[in-house]
Amino acid sequence: MKMIFAIVQDKDSNRLSAEFVDANIQATKLSTTGGFLKAGNTTFIIGIADERVDEVLKIIKETSHIREQFMTPPVSLDNTVGGESTYPVEVQVGGATVFVLPVEQFHRF
């Protein structure tokens, strides 16, 4: 058995959740916030049999999309910077960050 933690952008979470339901994959869905853009994410926690791990990863990969987004870097309060203004920069967001961990024991009460 494996434990899968999948962190996806909120824009992909409803579709991914529906795909899990269609595939009879039970998942716990948590609202989370990313540290870099301070944007909403969703973290799915999935306990799954070893032989279904590739199926789960395929669903996550097909459902979670990378997007381009503009962000404005935080304004520096450091006076040594020279007072330069900050301009929006394009960054990649989305996709999925997935951790697959072995499960030593599983209990359902």
Image (spheres, rainbow, N blue to C red):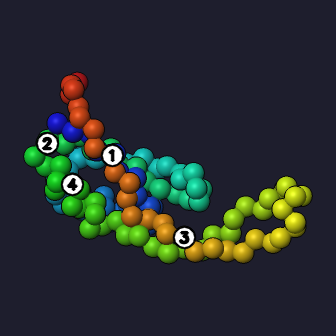
Tell me where residue 72 appears, x and y as whole percent: 68, 69
Q: Secondary structure at mark 1?
A: strand
Kindly check if marks 4 and 3 are in contact, taking CB atoms under 8 A apart as contact.
Answer: no
The C terminus is located in which quarter?
A: top left
Q: CA distance from mark 3 to mark 1?
A: 23 Å
- Residue at figure coordinates x 41%, y 70% from the top left: 66
Q: According to the image, label 1 marks what residue?
A: 99
Does 2 appear above or below 8? Answer: above
Q: Quadrant of the N terminus?
A: top left
Report if the CB atoms under discs 1 and 2 are less than 8 Å apart. no
Q: Which residue is at 52% across, 57% downward? A: 40
Name which residue lies at 54% across and 73% down.
69
Q: CA distance from mark 1 to mark 2?
A: 14 Å
Q: Earlier in the sequence, mark 4 or mark 3?
A: 4
Q: Earlier in the sequence, mark 3 or mark 1?
A: 3
Mark 2, residue position? 50
Mark 2 and mark 3 lie on one chain; the one further toward the N terminus is: 2
Q: What's the amino acid at mark 3?
A: Val
Which residue type does callout 1 highlight? Phe
- Three-letter amino acid code at the position of disc 4: Val
Question: Reading the chain from its start, which is encountered first: label 1 or label 2?
Answer: 2
Q: Is residue 27 left or right of residue 9?
A: left
Q: Which is in the foreground here, disc 2 or disc 3?
A: 3
What amino acid is at disc 2?
Asp
Q: Which residue is mark 4?
A: 56
Distance from disc 4 to disc 2, alpha carbons, whole Å, reads 10 Å
Q: x and y percent of residue 38 in the render?
A: 60, 56
Under tag 4, what secondary structure? helix
Could you say which is closer to the camera, residue 62 or residue 12?
A: 62
Q: Are marks 1 and 4 in contact (CB under 8 Å)?
A: no
Q: Secondary structure at mark 2?
A: helix
